[in-house]
Structure formats: structure tokens, C-alpha cells
Amino acid sequence: MVAVPVLRPMTEDDVPGAHEVMVAAFAELEQRLHQPPSPPRDPAGGYVRLLRILGTDPGGSWVAEDGAGLAGAALAIMREGVWGLSLLVVRPDLQSAGIGRALLARALAYGDRAAGAIILASPDPRALRSYARAGFALHPSLSATGAPQHVVGCADVRPFEPDDHELAASVDRAVRGAAHGADLDALAEGGCELLVLPGRGYAAHRDGAVKTIAARDDEAAGALLRSVLARIPPGGAAEVDWITGSQQWAIDVAVAARLDLRPAGAVALRGDVGSFRPYLPGGAYL
């Protein structure tokens, strides 16, 4: 007899298993959508993310478990009244069995009183339908990848310092309705480099993959993105995700750097999330 998955709050002991389910679920999605497989990554950064959210948002951290181990996981965060879905994954052999729907319901319940909500949705048609039914407006997005060419960074961009948190919080509240706060420190702990354009904005990236860019104006956001691309060593590749039509500044930089633009998933928004531009969100902390 097959055991029916049981939903329960996530614990620290679940972190390795949740990470394994995440890797397997994303690999299955790439295969199903005929996308090239993502390169393997050191799980340490993923563990930092899971432990961080479990520590700050235990009420939004859920797993499903059956006789074979973890069947799925959902992680939701709340930051200054803005809710975000950091992770929703189901083990490939159990997808379309209602587990994802049940986990999403628990995660959404955690944000019942949120003023705004953010989901970065994969191209999975099932996920897109679920988020639309939950009242989210879907903003189709692009990804930009490839080896940047002829990119010159901004001379005023420098490494992020502790005193720059005040600027980051001010920018965050304008573009996404809530500050990231110590989530930025968690990004650094997970291997990201944080950069700042004094007075105007900041960026976080790891090995050419943009994790977030937030700025007071399009020119500053473009300067930060060019500075990230300029840091990629010869032979390295850029990965810039969640570029919606509102982020034309990012499209302009990507085109000038001769990156390949492809349709991706969607940025799903509900309620008050600020202007959401100029802004590139990141999957972990949105």
C-alpha cells in the first residue's frame, strides 16, 4: 500500500532532503521543457537559503513526506508586510497528485495579511495556472544568457559595505514594497558578491548569475548590470532572469552585450509591491 504524503512544518533535519527534491524537480522541468540541463552547483549555498528562511519564517516553511522520504517542500517569506514564495517543489514521481496544491495553500495562508505578494513562476503551465487562480497578475519574463561582449563596468560601482544597508532598504521599499534587510547578508554568505552604486542602488550576483538588482532609476540599474557583466571572466557566462517588459533598461544592456534573450517564466504580483522597477528580483528572497 502506497503511503499518502503527510504535510508538516519543516525542520532543520529536512534541509538536505528538501534540497534534493528541489534539484530533482528543476531537472525534471528542464527535461520536460526540452531545456539544456543546469550545471551542478555546490549545495552549500542552497542550504544557507533553506536554513535562513526556516529560521526567519518557520510558519511559512512546510514539507510533504511519504514512505520514501520528502515528497515536496514550500518556503514562504514575509518582509515588512510583503509575502513571497521562495520555493515550491514536488518530487517528480508525485507531481500532478495534488501535493503542490496543498503545499501552496499552506504557503499562501502564511501571507493572509500581507499587503503585497510576489512569486517568480517557472514556465510550468500547471504552476502558472495555480498562481493566476490565486489572484496573481502574471508578467511574462525573459532570461538573458551567454558570454558578454564589449561590456564596460561603471567606475563608481564598488563592493557593498555594512553602511550600505540603509541605502538598500530605502531602494527596496520603493521598488518592491519591503526591505531585504539581512537577506542580503545571507546572499553574501551563500557566495554572492554584493555591489553598490553609492546613493543610487545595489546588485548581488554569483559567478555571472544576477540574484537581484534594485536602483532609484533606470540609468543606475543599467550601470549596475553592466558592472556585473564586466566582472565575468573570459569564458564565463551571464545569467540574467526575470526580465519583464517593465525592465527595458535590462533588455537594452543585454542586447548591447550580445546576450541571448529567451522567453522564460513569469513574475507574478498581487497587491502593493511598490513600482517593481527598475528591479530584477531573485528566486531565494524575491
Image: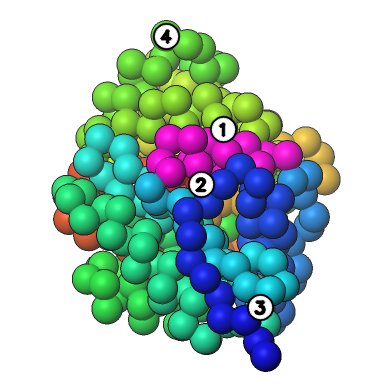
Q: Earlier in the sequence, mark 4 or mark 1?
A: 4
Q: Secondary structure at mark 4?
A: helix
Residue annotated with mark 3: 92
Cα–Cα span, label 2 and label 3: 21 Å
| Residue type of the residue flagged with mark 4 | Asp
Question: Which of the image's four quarters has the N terminus?
Answer: bottom right
Q: Secondary structure at mark 1?
A: helix
**Viewed as shown, does residue 54 lie left or right of 229?**
left
Residue annotated with mark 4: 163
Observer-nearest residue: 66 or 223? 66
Residue annotated with mark 2: 284
Question: Can residue 256 be seen in this snapshot?
Answer: no
* Residue 180 position in % (x across, y down): 38, 32
Instruction: Read off the magenta span.
Output: 44-58
Residue annotated with mark 1: 187
Observer-nearest residue: 6 or 250? 6
Q: Quarter-wise, where is residue 120 in the image? A: bottom left
Of circles 2 and 4, the one toward us is 2
Are dots 2 and 3 in contact, CB under 8 Å?
A: no
**Viewed as shown, does residue 174 lie left or right of 219?**
left
Magenta stretch: dominant SS? helix
Mark 2 burial class by Cα count in 10 Å: few <14, some 14-19, many 20+: many
Are dots 1 and 2 in contact, CB under 8 Å?
A: yes
Q: Secondary structure at mark 2?
A: loop
Of circles 4 and 3, the one toward us is 3
**Viewed as shown, does residue 122 lie left or right of 208?**
left
Q: Residue at the location (49% across, 77% down)?
A: 99
